Amino acid sequence: MSMDVRHINAFLEATKTVFDTMLKIPVTFEKPVLNSAPQTHDVSGVIGLSGDVVGSVVIGFGEQTAVRIVCAFAGTRHAFGSADFEDAIGELTNMIVGAAKSKFEGLSVSIGCPSVITSPDHHVSRPSDAASICIPCDTPGGRFVIEVTFRSIDKAASSKPVAGEESNAITSAKSAA
């Protein structure tokens, strides 16, 4: 299964806009690659997607990069793992994913509330049947990655709830080849 390049471009554009306007630091991107194994991070901002696009987005940082990014974003230094630090990571994640979602023309997509994980060398699991793309990002404050994972659900199959599932089954748009 392949992911629509417009979805990836939406994350590139959203990240650049948020970093230019809110952090006032440049961000550049390496070529997005198929993410065969979850990346390890010290800090992750995670948001789920539902509706016509089902999946999740993980923005993962090393500890020092996260501290520098939060300082640029908040305008002051927050201790790693503090409530203010985690709020800043969550808000940054929310802004990027929200801006990207707004570019998903013709699709009905909702995003959840961000969750933040601060734990050395963790990874965020994803469904084995999901397409996942890793977008490596570079800033003067360090590198981070954006992991975009979508799972395609057959609309015909999802329109008939399975016993124990809610009657409003989630559907997703077919990914372009």
Image (cartoon, rainbow, N blue to C red):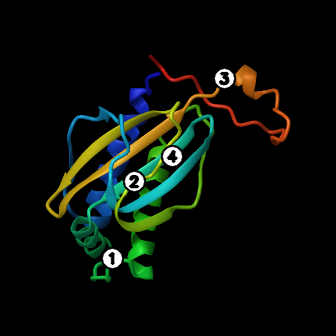
For the residues marked 1 and 3, what is the alpha-carbon distance in whole angstroms? 42 Å
Which dot marks residue 74?
Answer: 1
> 62 or 155: nearer the eye?
62
Secondary-structure class at tag 4: strand
Give coordinates of residue 79: x percent, y percent: 32, 83
Q: Is residue 104 visible?
A: no
Q: Nearer the viewer, mark 2 or mark 1?
A: 2
Which dot marks residue 64?
Answer: none
The amino acid type found where label 1 is placed reads Ala
Instruction: Kindly identify which residue carries mark 4.
Output: 56
Neighbourhood count class around disc 1 (C-alpha, 10 Å): few under 14, some 14–19, many 20 upward:
some
For the residues marked 2 and 3, what is the alpha-carbon distance in whole angstroms? 28 Å
Q: Are marks 4 and 1 in contact (CB under 8 Å)?
A: no
In the image: residue 146, left or right of residue 137: right
Neighbourhood count class around disc 2 (C-alpha, 10 Å): few under 14, some 14–19, many 20 upward:
some
Instruction: Kindly identify which residue carries mark 3.
Output: 154
Residue 67, image quadrant: bottom left
The amino acid type found where label 3 is placed reads Asp
Q: Nearer the viewer, mark 1 or mark 3?
A: 3
The amino acid type found where label 2 is placed reads His
The amino acid type found where label 4 is placed reads Ser
Secondary-structure class at tag 2: loop
